[in-house]
Amino acid sequence: MADRGGIEAGTEQERNIEVVRRYLRTFLTKDLAELAEVVAEDVEIYGSGTAVRGRRYPEGAVSSPGLTVIDQQILEIFAAGDRVVVSMAQTYRRDATGATTVQSACKMYRLAGGRIVQFWGEQDTYGLLRGLGLLPDEPIAF
């Protein structure tokens, strides 16, 4: 039986979507043990003009001191072969001030053996910093 995205139940694509959902959930739970189950130790990460390797990078993002994800909304999730693409919005709280803001993001993951081995993505870091009061709420002069 196919779901609304046309993916057959029990397929590799469905399993990959669940792995990505588990990974994204760790931003809410801060469960680094679960993150280790779904992200390869030598994961490759591309985005914001950088390329890094190693699970310590997403672990650092999940456990950012002073910044807490308080809500997460997956707007769209799509699987094709070994790839999963997600558009999402996360609500963050700056713990020192209580300020909250929403950051949008679009990510693409490649999976192998039930783990994320590569991901690419962009997120609105500028909007996040402005919304949390860490940058002035005015246009940047170039």
Image (spheres, rainbow, N blue to C red):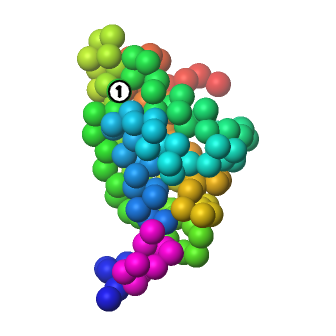
Question: Is 104 placed above or below 62 here?
Answer: below
**Residue drawn 30% across the image and 12% down it:** 97
**Residue drawn 71% across the image and 40% down it:** 53
Q: Does the stretch in magenta take in 14?
A: yes
Residue 125: where, in percent of width, then height? 50, 33
Q: Which residues are magenta?
A: 6-15
Residue 103: where, in percent of width, then height? 40, 38
| Mark 1 neighbour class, 10 Å CA radius: few under 14, some 14 to 19, many 20 or more | many
Question: Is 6 placed above or below 73 here?
Answer: below
Q: Quadrant of residue 48?
A: top right
Residue 19: where, in percent of width, then height? 46, 58
Q: Is residue 28 visible?
A: yes
Return the residue at label 1.
Answer: 68
Residue 27: where, in percent of width, then height? 40, 38
**Residue drawn 34% across the image and 58% down it:** 75
Name the outermost residue toward the top. Answer: 96
**Tally of numbered tags:** 1
**Residue drawn 40% across the image and 55% down it:** 21
The C terminus lies in quadrant: top right
Q: Secondary structure at mark 1?
A: strand
